[in-house]
Image (cartoon, rainbow, N blue to C red):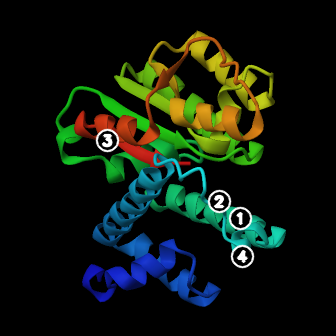
Amino acid sequence: MSNDFSDERLNAFIDNEMDLAEKQRVFEAFRQDEALRKRACELQKTHDLIKLTYQSVNPPTSYQTPLRSQARPWFLSNMVAATILVVVSSLLGWFGHQALTPNSSLLDLARAVQPPQAVNSGARKIMLHVSTSDEYRLNIMLEETEHLLKASRKNGEKVFVEILANGPGLKIVDNIGSAPARRLQKLQTRYDNLYVTACAQAIERLRITKGIKLDLIPNASVVRSSLSEVLKRQREGWTYIRI
């Protein structure tokens, strides 16, 4: 079945260029075809890396945002965010087996898209790239992460998780005291196999554009750029999941 879907068709799905009926057909195909799921995940990963590359390049000082971008209707942004949430939720529901529970979907997703070099390693390593400030999505991610860490400790499994905050996702590492940030701090105190990092370029961009000097939560470290961190972790066999 995987060959029935061209890259162009999968890219249209990823870019939210399909109507609801077509999306439902794609989701049904995903449920039945593991190879197709992996192809879609690889294409999504490529999209994310391209986006990260552009985010890592600062525009010239004379650059002006096109008017059509400045005038983007608010409801379009909400629609895009809602669509991404639906896609993520669907992804997390793809990978089922007899031991699957409602809260174990993050691990199942990681198992399905893990790089080849991670299959035979002694530990499971997962990078969660957080680029949203939506508290609902952040709390879902934190709930999944807590369940994964708790289950791995109980079962004596080696699992390492890195939460990489970038762009609007810096909210989760802001020491100003948002609910997700407080929840993340509690997880850090309980699990030494949970790493929290923040993109230095995004922090600097926030300072320049909005005059905000970010105060990071304790035990959060700063990496040069999200792109370099993602590429480094993938070379080391970490599974990349974008939130």
Q: Which amino acid, by three-letter code, is at mark 4?
A: Arg
Cα separation between marks 2 and 1:
5 Å
Estimate the spatial distance between the alpha carbons at disc 1 and disc 4, rounded to whole Å. 21 Å
Number of the label disc, if any, that sits on residue 85: 2
Tell which of 184 and 28 is nearer to you: 184
Residue under label 3, please give it.
231
Look at 36% across and 60% down and name the residue there.
46
As drawn, the label of residue 68 is 4
Residue occupying the point 19% across, 47% down: 116
Quarter of the view holding residue 157:
top left
In the rendered image, residue 201, in percent from the top left (x then y), is placed at: 53, 35
| Amino acid bearing label 1 | Ala
Q: Name the residue under label 1.
A: 82
Neighbour class for label 4 at 10 Å: few (<14), some, many (≥20)?
few
**Closer to us: 45 or 121:** 45
Callout 1: SS: helix
Asked if marks 2 and 4 touch (Cβ < 8 Å), the reply is: no
Q: How far apart are marks 3 and 1 (CA)?
A: 28 Å
